[in-house]
Image (tube, grey):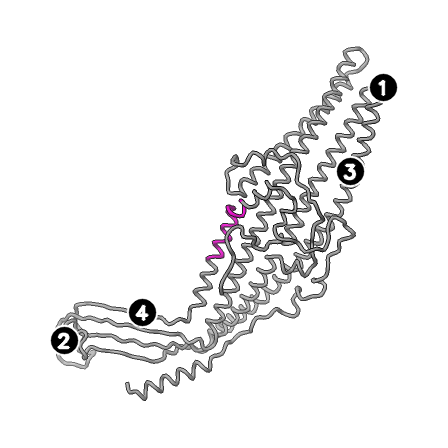
């Protein structure tokens, strides 16, 4: 090949590269996306709830409980939880997939060689005499480079990068969920201990009432109906104890699993908790705009929309020609002559492959467009669900606070009544059974209040989870940083 020919080929390659374009739509957040609406960015309806405010949700929200043991459990869960580990390694895989797509246009260098004993067809060389059996050898190097004329590789890299970002958001979701589960089960275990104590106190009161009824019967002043009724009440209250014990055990077993431990492998202070930690300040909820930026499931849905948009470009580029620049050099011939000038070979030039677009190709593009539309619908649904969920939990929390306030008033009234009847009994002005009745009323009020307190704790954890947990990569667990 002459120098002029090589120069012409090089000039053609340069001209081809300069004419490269990227087909398919460039990604941008649609103007009609739900996240763009003014209403979605607005503050939440807090309904005058003094237990929440519009301050920004901090990182490490669980530290608002000011419980060192809880902090220790969360830290360990973030380091050892199996769901977090799974999400982290899924992210690693997605990132390496991005790396493969990102470097798909690199120059490929390869080599090949072969050695054989055989006979070449004389007819294929237009010879009349048979060619003798000989030792044949081939050795050479090749260089190839795919021209991304229509952006197929670029769009594929965009799609892979967006998918990796979605996996990073999924890791944040796993972390937030695990933190919420640890806090939820910890407070459930603590509340179960409180409720169990109150139930045991109620049982003790009823046992005393049974004892009084029995003594009155033996003294000829009572009747068997009162004794049977008191005994039935004792057994009914005794039946309430196992569910609280089971509830506490289940919460402790769940904490162990979240920490990557076996069921019985938990620090003793966890099982000994008898009072659930309480928030020392109103819950900071921010506004809709902050929520939509913070929630990782929304980030994941947006990134999947970006990936689906890039896939349209990949499918579109498949309808255009594919051009590869290649060169190879080596030696082919008889083994004993290998490396002689007569066995030398080389070639350089572009290779073009293309087929006329068919209905299959056009259907592929339409399928990718439908996938992008579906991803937008999923993104919109995720945004609207996040706003709905948060506002619903805020409303429920406000109503549960009202109920808790009423139950607290009821407990206080029952406590005052019990104090009054206790004094009357001590002064001999009231029967013992009447005093026990007021004690039982107080125990029932305390049980209802304890159940309400447990529900408030669950409301708080669910609200923190709906708010996105305030996760800002506090250095716990595997890193999510990707270098694109």
Q: Which image quadrant for residue 458?
A: top right
Horizontal and vertical percent position of residue 271: 59, 34
- Badge 3 marks a residue whose secondary structure is helix
The mark found on residue 427 in the picture is: 1
For marks 4 and 3 on the same chain, the one whose residue lies earlier in the sequence: 4
Q: In the image as oriented, which residue stretches furthest toward the right?
A: 429
Q: Which image quadrant for residue 40?
A: bottom right
**Is label 4 or label 2 in front?**
4
Residue at image mark 2: 131
- State which region is magenta: 76-92
- As measured in the structure, the alpha-carbon distance from the residue carrying label 4 to the one carrying label 2 is 32 Å
Q: Residue at x 71, y 37 (%)?
A: 451
In this picture, residue 432 sits left or right of residue 24: right
The mark found on residue 111 in the picture is: none
Which residue occupies the foreground of this view, 250 or 478?
478
- Badge 4 marks a residue whose secondary structure is strand
> How packed is label 1: few (under 14 Cα within 10 Å), some, or many (20 or more)?
few
Kindly indicate whether the residue at mark 2 contacts the one at mark 4 (C-beta within 8 angstroms).
Answer: no
The mark found on residue 408 in the picture is: 3
- Badge 1 marks a residue whose secondary structure is loop
Which quarter of the rendered picture does the N terminus lie within? bottom left
For marks 1 and 2 on the same chain, the one whose residue lies earlier in the sequence: 2
- As measured in the structure, the alpha-carbon distance from the residue carrying label 3 to the one carrying label 2 is 107 Å
In this picture, residue 404 sits left or right of residue 257: right
**Is label 3 or label 1 in front?**
1
- As measured in the structure, the alpha-carbon distance from the residue carrying label 4 to the one carrying label 3 is 79 Å
For marks 4 and 1 on the same chain, the one whose residue lies earlier in the sequence: 4
Residue at image mark 4: 110
In this picture, residue 406 sits left or right of residue 160: right
Q: How many marks?
A: 4
Query: Relative to 171, does residue 400 appear above or below in the rendering?
Result: above
């Amino acid at each position: 090949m002459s120098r002029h020919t090589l120069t012409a080929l090089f000039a053609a390659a340069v001209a081809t590269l300069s004419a490269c374009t990227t087909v398919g739509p460039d990604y941008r957040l649609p103007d009609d996306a739900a996240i763009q609406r003014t209403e979605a960015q607005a503050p939440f309806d807090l309904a005058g709830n003094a237990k929440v405010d519009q301050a920004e949700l901090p990182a490490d929200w669980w530290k608002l409980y000011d419980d060192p043991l809880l902090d220790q459990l969360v830290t360990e869960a973030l380091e050892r939880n199996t769901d977090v580990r799974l999400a982290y390694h899924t992210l690693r895989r997605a990132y390496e997939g991005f790396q493969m797509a990102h470097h798909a246009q690199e120059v490929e260098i390869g080599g090949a060689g072969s050695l054989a004993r055989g006979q070449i067809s004389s007819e294929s060389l237009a010879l009349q005499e048979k060619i003798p059996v000989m030792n044949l050898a081939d050795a050479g190097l090749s260089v190839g480079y795919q021209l991304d004329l229509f952006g197929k590789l670029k769009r594929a890299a965009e799609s892979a990068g967006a998918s990796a970002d979605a996996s990073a958001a999924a890791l944040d979701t796993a972390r937030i969920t695990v933190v919420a589960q640890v806090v939820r089960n910890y407070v459930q275990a603590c509340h179960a201990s409180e409720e169990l104590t109150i139930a045991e106190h109620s049982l003790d009161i009823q046992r005393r009432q049974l004892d009084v009824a029995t003594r009155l019967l033996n003294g000829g002043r009572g009747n068997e109906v009162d004794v049977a009724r008191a005994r039935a009440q004792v057994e009914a209250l005794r039946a309430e104890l196992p569910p609280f014990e089971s509830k506490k055990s289940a919460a402790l077993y769940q904490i162990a699993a979240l920490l990557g431990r076996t069921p019985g492998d938990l620090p003793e202070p966890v099982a000994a908790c008898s009072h659930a930690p309480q928030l020392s300040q109103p819950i900071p909820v921010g506004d809709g705009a902050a929520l939509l930026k913070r929630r990782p499931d929304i980030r994941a849905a947006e990134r999947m929309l970006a990936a689906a948009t890039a896939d349209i470009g990949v499918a579109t580029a498949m309808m255009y020609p594919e051009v590869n620049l290649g060169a190879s050099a080596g030696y082919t011939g008889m083994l004993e002559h290998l490396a002689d000038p007569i066995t030398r070979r080389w070639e350089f030039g572009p290779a073009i492959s293309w087929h006329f677009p068919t209905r299959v190709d056009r259907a592929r593009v339409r399928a990718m467009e439908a996938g992008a539309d579906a991803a937008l619908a999923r993104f919109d649904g995720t945004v609207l669900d996040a706003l709905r969920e948060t506002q619903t939990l805020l409303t429920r929390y406000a109503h549960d606070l009202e109920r808790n306030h009423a139950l607290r008033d009821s407990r206080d009234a029952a406590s005052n009544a019990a104090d009054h009847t206790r004094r009357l009994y001590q002064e001999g002005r009231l029967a013992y059974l009447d005093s026990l009745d007021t004690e039982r009323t107080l125990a029932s009020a305390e049980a209802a209040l304890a159940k309400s307190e447990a529900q408030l704790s669950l409301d708080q954890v669910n609200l923190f989870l709906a708010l996105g947990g305030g996760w800002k990569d506090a250095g716990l667990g595997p890193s999510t940083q990707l270098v694109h």
